Image (tube, rainbow, N blue to C red):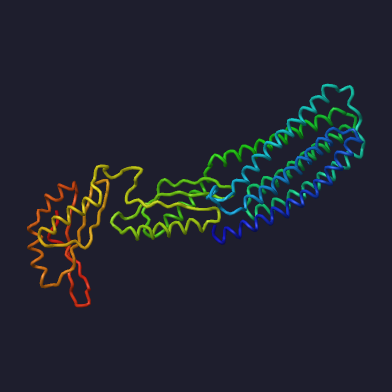
Amino acid sequence: MSSTLAAQSAEKQRVARTSTFASIALNTVLMSMQIVIGVFAHSQALVADGVHSLADLVSDFVVLIANRHSAAEPDADHNYGHSRYETVASLFLGGLLISVGVGMLWRAGARLSDMQNIPAVHLSALAVAIVVLLSKEGLFRYMLREAQRVRSAMLIANAWHARSDAASSLVVALGILGSIAGVRLLDPIAAAIVGFMVARMGWTFGWDALQDLSDRALNEADTADLRSRIMSTPGVRDVHELRTRKMGDFALVDAHILVDPMISVSEGHYIAETARSRVLSDSRVLDALIHVDPENDAISRPPVNLPPRAKIVAEVDTALAAQGLTAASVNLHYLSTGLDIEVTLQPSRLGALESEVHQLERIDLEALKLRLGARRLSVTHAVDVSTAGAELAREPRGDA
């Protein structure tokens, strides 16, 4: 992991701990008030909201555990790190909220089926509901601001969980107010609405987490930005098979880049590393794999029956040795159009060049090309023009 990503991860952990401990402290106080006063004031809606706050406490501890484990360094079993622990935590939170919401709906339905025995709600329940509403809204604004600052999907989900608490507290307050006004069925109706809201929020979190665990890609705008970074790399002609997959709050990137098919392997590698560096400069990217292509292999590929390097070099060396010549290098280009072979002879002095030319002319390059199944075969002379061994490359006379 780069130093930038490490710093981002450390800051995210710090924010997660601070905001989550603040949430734990507040929810502990509010839960106690809601359940105790709810039972005393005969408000099912307030008790339901207290159970919701209890679920918040459980989710806060889940966030703390996930935050701790997701920061672990990559190991033999997790080569890309442990960022998906946060996604698993979000999935667990979603399941927890669905369970709590369904339980609230069931309890509210049971109360509504026995409307004759719905007790009057005490005024103290309304006061607690208002305090809870204001507290949860304040907690939401604080948590969302911090979560967006460190760009943590798990913390953002937890913040919106607090907003759902504020919304449910508003419904509870309205239900209690209606019940105090004489419409007693409004309290269990409010409890049912809270249950539905909680279950719906759980479904949203759980579904998003499940999609991320199924290797969901970045959105179109983020993907287009990554493509632009790669295309701006000198030497990159095109990009294809650009694929991304979420890894917690980060993403893994795979891409094929198209380069000049006639450049060296080292130059192609340099271009790929430059492109990778540009991709990794994006704070969303955890790692990137850049594959170099001389052609778009999604459209065309070289024939599969072309001879390997060992056979080609052996044939070329045999043909040259028969005339007293030696190859300094043999470059091969396996393209969809066929095989191109470029042979450079050992450097010779200017005085020996004419003799080498005559030697080369005695080699049947056309027959050699046909034996190797090549589309093109060229032989180039490297001439030693000084005692220091400087070389001057000339266009070959032998080209088949």
| Depicted 53 relative to depicted 116: above or below | below
Query: In this orientation, which residue lies closer to the viewer: 179 or 17?
Result: 17
| Depicted 137 relative to depicted 386: above or below | above
Q: In which quarter of the image is residue 48?
A: top right
Residue 10, horizontal then vertical, whole percent: 64, 58
State the residue at coordinates (15%, 50%): 369
In the image: residue 214, left or right of residue 68:
left
State the residue at coordinates (80%, 50%): 25
In the image: residue 135, left or right of residue 88:
right
Query: In this orientation, which residue lies closer to the viewer: 188 or 155?
Result: 155
Residue 190, horizontal then vertical, whole percent: 80, 32
How many numbered marks, from 0 up?
0
Query: In this orientation, which residue lies closer to the viewer: 395 or 333?
Result: 333
Image quarter hosting the N terminus: bottom right
Residue 375, horizontal then vertical, whole percent: 19, 49
| Depicted 168 relative to depicted 292: above or below | above
